[in-house]
Amino acid sequence: MTDIRPSWSLPSPPHPYASPGPRATVRRVTIRTRLGRIPWQAFVVAATAALLAVLLPPGGTAQAAPEGPRAAAPGGPRAAVPGESRPVYSYDRAIRESVWVDTKLDGDSDGRTDRVAVDIVRPRGPAEQGRRIPVIMDASPYYSCCGRGNESQKKTYDADGRPVQFPLFYDNYFVPRGYATVLVDLAGTNRSDGCVDVGGRSDVQSAKAVVDWLAGRARAYDAPTGGKRVIAGWSNGRTGMIGKSYDGTVANGVAATGVPNLRTIVPIGAISSWYDYYFSQGAPLYDSGPEWLSDHVESPAARTRCAAVQKELVDGAPRSGDRTGLWDARDYVKDAHKVKASVFVVHGMQDLNVRTKHFGQWWDALAKHGVERKIWLSQTGHVDPFDFRRADWVPTLHRWFDHYLLGYENGIDRAPMADVERAPGKWSTDRVWPAAGTAVRTTLRPGKGEQPGVGVLGTRPAPSGATETFTDDPKLSETDWAAHADEPTAAKVAFSTAPLAAPLRLSGAGQVTVTATPSTGTAHLSAVLADLGPAAIRDYTGPGEGIVTLDRRTCWGASRDGDSACYKETAADTAKVQQTVLSRGWADLGTYADPDKGRRLTPGKPYTITLDLAATDHVVPAGHRLALIVGGTDAGLIDPPSTRPTLTLDLSRTKAELPLTGAAHALSGEPRAPRTGAGPLDGLEAPRPGRPVPAAR
């Protein structure tokens, strides 16, 4: 990773709003790049000018002295960065309060508009000085049912109902630096009125109304019903939303409304289209619909008043996999053109809960509309970056919020766009993402090999009439398929390249088009890309999805009674494997003519369908082989069809179109399928079926 710290530093500013300003920023860059040519006297003059600029805020007016002594830097001492907010405000003296914001919706049909509970912690100093501050906001349904973070923290309150514990480190770290932290209970959860509608209007409006209130466009009160009106006079209106899983999904949804004053969002492992969370081109991903999730996160009181909303979720989300109006209303990708906020995406490339299609299609849509963006891709499953790269994540997030919420010109908007984990704890940095050269996809085609179901993968099309056959076995998964890619097995067909002459990088999302003839009236298809060769990877199928939690703790900010800034450390949970699945796609063959509606198949008739492969970034090393595997039910990841079909693939009409770099050199060898297998997939279990709940962790 590129070092985010400067090559030299000045003393830390006495105020979190101190900024070097545009001139100082230019001068500092000049010193860094041309230091060897500048006489020492000029260096002193420039450094002095920069120091004076650091001591002044962007407007040029000196600010009041900080409250008390400065706290030590979280995670250990760190050199001050010019233009970086510093922990100068007392966390003990911070103002903690709750308000209820009117959403202008009546989701539970009780004749009153719903109010959502909003818990706030903000530094006292700016309020006493009459100065307004920005907000970091996390809107969630999990604050009472499930908890947040690796330690499943929940909100807690004192005997008078005042908030005590704010889950996660955002308040501990950022409040002393001059930010407010705002945690919102989605409608129907914890202390909020209304009903959960799983990504719909109620969920999104729960958070959007708070953004509006912070900017003076909505009403709030000091009680769930009645009460006195509360004005957010302490807020400057600039809001950044952050959150993992459901929380990050809400951030995506709010950004897609185009609401003013939302300056940035940081979605972590977040959903971009709720249809794609429950289905993949008609193939069901879970054995239940959104009504289960709604019931799981709602407060006991909401369950008694939200039966009508539950029925709407059942009726509007048929298990047929057909796309309905309910899903259209929960598709944020189509509204990416409305997004005004910058977006910092974080996702695990082996996230089998919120699969990687979500970040891929959202990223592409944002790029199409010129949205400022940044991305981190890890080897983990559904894991927060605080738990897989903590020491880099906290200062990077700090710089991000300082730039987009405080206006510091700290260069993060001009920094490389992407960080990608290549091996456990080993990261690479890219100027742009997906990688340059992948806009034009490389077409690879399967061909027959020396054994049934074990073929070759190259650039030459198979001759007309070449076929391979497999029978759906809902007990087997992609893990089993990859482990036996070089062996004839009844449940899949596999095609692999020759050992690569050079590294081959897949960066982005691909597609696989197949022509298949089913033996029954229903069939599901899976397409999998695998790296065949030994590697050490994060064990994403393990209980921690790539991390193991340790007993020792480190502290990231200030603590007080009931709200500690100290969290358990983690380490990479690794496995040695012989094959690595790197991208996946699933579909109901019945959606061959219309991705939004399935049809009954005619046994013995060929159908052509294109499966979308989930976005990823993976380098297949020289000497390894790239494999395309096609099967039926991917156990643990999609549900089986109502029948157990045998499918015959027409190889001449089957192809993979992939965003590859280095293909011309890597694929120089003649594809050849080996006669013997590579052995079991050592150390990695099959994907485990799970309830459709974005993990609370």
Image (cartoon, helix red, strand yellow):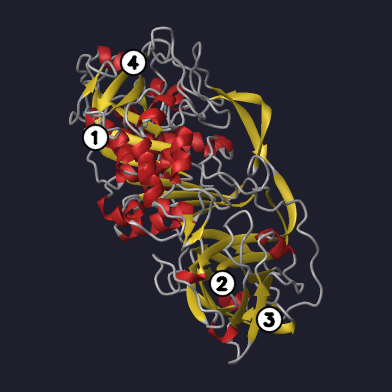
Camera-near label (4 vs 2) is 4
Along the horizontal axis of the image, is 407 left or right of 682? left
Labelled disc at residue 105: 1
Of 513 and 621, nearer the camera is: 513
- Within 10 angstroms of label 2, few (less than 14), some, or many (20 or more) residues? some
| Front disc: 3 or 2 | 3
Could one spot residue 407 in this view of the protein? no
The percent coordinates of residue 185 (x first, y second) are: 38, 28
Residue highlighted by disc 2: 662
Q: Mark 3 and mark 1: span between their CA atoms?
A: 61 Å
**Residue shown at the point (39%, 12%) measured from the top left:** 161
- Label 1's element? loop
- Residue 79 horizontal side relative to residue 261, left or right: right
> Which residue matches tag 3?
671
User: Residues under labels 4 and 1: Cα distance?
Assistant: 24 Å
Viewer-side label of 4, 1: 1
* Mark 4 or mark 1: whose residue is earlier in sequence: 4
Amino acid type assigned to the residue bearing label 3 in the image: Pro
